[in-house]
Image (tube, coloured by chain):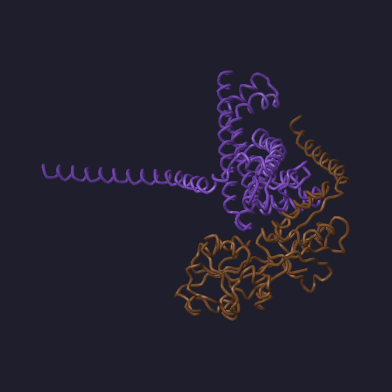
Amino acid sequence: MAIRYSLPVFCLAYLAMTGSNHAAGQENLTGKLTLTGSSTIAPLVSDLAKKFEKTHPGVRVDVQTGGSSRGVLDARQGTADIGMVSRALKEDEQDLKSYPIALDGICVIVHSTNPVKELTDSQIVAIYTGRVKNWKDVGGLDKQIMVVNKAEGRSTLELFLHYTKLKLPDIKADVIIGDNEQGIKTVAGNPYSVAYVSIGTAEYNATHGTQIKLLPLHGIQPSMQALIDHKFALSRPLNLVTKTEPTGIAKEFIAFAAAPENDSIVKGQYFVPLAKR
Amino acid sequence: MMVSRQVLTRTSRIRASRARLQNRIAAAVIWGGAIFVAALFAWLMADILWHGWREISLAYFTQEPESAGRLGGISSILVSTGLILIVCLVSALPIGLGTAIFLAEYTGPEDTVSRKIRLSLNVLAGTPSIVFGLFGNAFFCKMLGMGFSILSGGLTLACMVLPYFIRIAEESIRSVPQSYRMGAVALGLSKSTQIMRLILPVAVPGILGAIILSVGRSLSETAALIFTSGYVDRMPESLYDSGRSLSVHIYDLSMNVAGGDQRAYSAALVLIVSLILINFITGLIGRAWSRRMISIS
């Protein structure tokens, strides 16, 4: 009998314990800042958070990921103090306040052995909608194109759709990926694939021996410098968003994240600091 | 007569050589399979060792990660991983063992109740881990208000490993010879004494196997943890802090951080070596236990 009852008793005791402990813990939450959202921004903000914690002992900054849509949702619902969104806010998101902390651009990449030198906007659209299925139609070899697309909710996808004026159902993709590094690995491993990824990451990989090639857009070679000079068409701001005007720690952290003395951290994560302030 | 005998011996010789050939093919296939598995593991190990060993030093184990994990070490990540694992085992073991004892000792294999429980376990075992992650996020983090914490992560993992643990533990309890139970009944032992003093001690090596499998699943899990225990790589101060597990760290370094590959390999090396160590140590405990049981009896 003892064994028969010990299980439910254990469960109840467990729940009671966790419940009461938590109530006690809640009072200590002052001085804690939670950020959620874009996995592109998360490593940058984590790094900024570490420096912020050093200069503000007693404050703890927790960074979680999940994608830009999640950042918008969590900021709106109040589950997070600040959301991280790696694009400009959309029309139906104007209820949120956004604060850019850095810039990023996306570029089209192919395998480094691919002879194609440039793709025009209409060629990119044709490839991604499946109208062009072979590299020979855009000046390449007689090989099938493997189209790599980003998963729904990723802001690189949204920026790409915005730029190409396509809708998600129009895109006929062979591979769906999540993060930038995954896109780069997919292209480096498949000589006839095409993808679009964050410029900073792509540039880092291309200069460190990964077999990828960054294709110019409107004759402009994608690079961090082109982004700084605002020459590159496909760029996006990396935003911190809040539901209301930030106060207290949130306000302090947002100002800290965009401050010029932290430009080196932004560059360290292969993003572009905001232009001259 | 002579001719027919010659024909006979010839056919039997052909038959024998055909049998020998079949034997050889079968042996080749079986050996091939075994060698393939071993080679696959050796290749994986060699690849990770080759890429990962350079970054590993004492400092790697004592420093916290810097610059999104490109610099520094993994001390805080090891602590978080350990805490998540402890929470998972502490909550999964009693529930799992209880269910396994119930299924093996209090119900027959064909009872309606045990069939229903077993069906739910099978479905749970086949559920993708991301579903557990979303469940954990909704239930532990939001509904029970634990937030992104090591506690939420550990409890989510416990839900995930329970089905495997229960099924293996149940099998090992069931495989205790029936004569032991009969002997216990003949001696007039109560059911609970019987289970605690006789059946569980005999089943310990099997239960240890179930624990090894659970630990392996827990250490390798990413999807169930990224939305429950979270992404924070600071040294955790309590179970209510968010803490990044080793597998989430590897995932982030290889998928999200430009130039994080090298460090992803190092972290993967640490993960695999610790898995091998845990297997080895648990194996030793199991063997020592079996020897003790034999010497007692």
Seen in the picture, residue A181 relative to B208 is either above or below; the reply is below
Image vertical order of residue B60 relative to residue A45, above or below: above
On screen, residue B49 versus residue B81, left or right, reads: left
The percent position of residue A94, horizontal first and vertical second, equals 82, 71
x then y, percent, for residue B293? 58, 22
Q: Residue at x 77, y 70 (%)?
A: A89
Q: Nearer the viewer, residue B114 or A230?
A: A230
Residue B237, position in %: x, y? Answer: 77, 41
Q: Residue at x 79, y 66 (%)?
A: A99
Position of residue A158 in the picture relative to residue A241 (left or right): left
Residue drawn at point x = 56 percent, y = 18 percent: B295
Along the viewing direction, whichever of A45 and B237 lies nearer the viewer = A45
**Chain seen in brown:** A
Q: Is residue B256 above or below residue B77?
A: below
Q: Position of residue B271 (x, y in %)?
A: 59, 43
Q: Nearer the viewer, residue B60 or A36?
A: B60
Residue B112 visible, this orientation: no
Say if residue A96 shows up in the picture: yes
Count of picture labels: 0
Picture quarter with the C terminus of chain B:
top right
Chain for colour purple? B
Q: Please identify the quarter of the rendering in which residue A67 is found.
A: bottom right
Specify the farthest residue to the bottom.
A122
Query: Relative to residue A60, is residue A268 depicted above or below?
Result: below
Point out the image quarter for the N terminus of chain B. top left
Position of B213 compared to A84: left or right?
left
Which quadrant of the structure image shows residue A250? bottom right
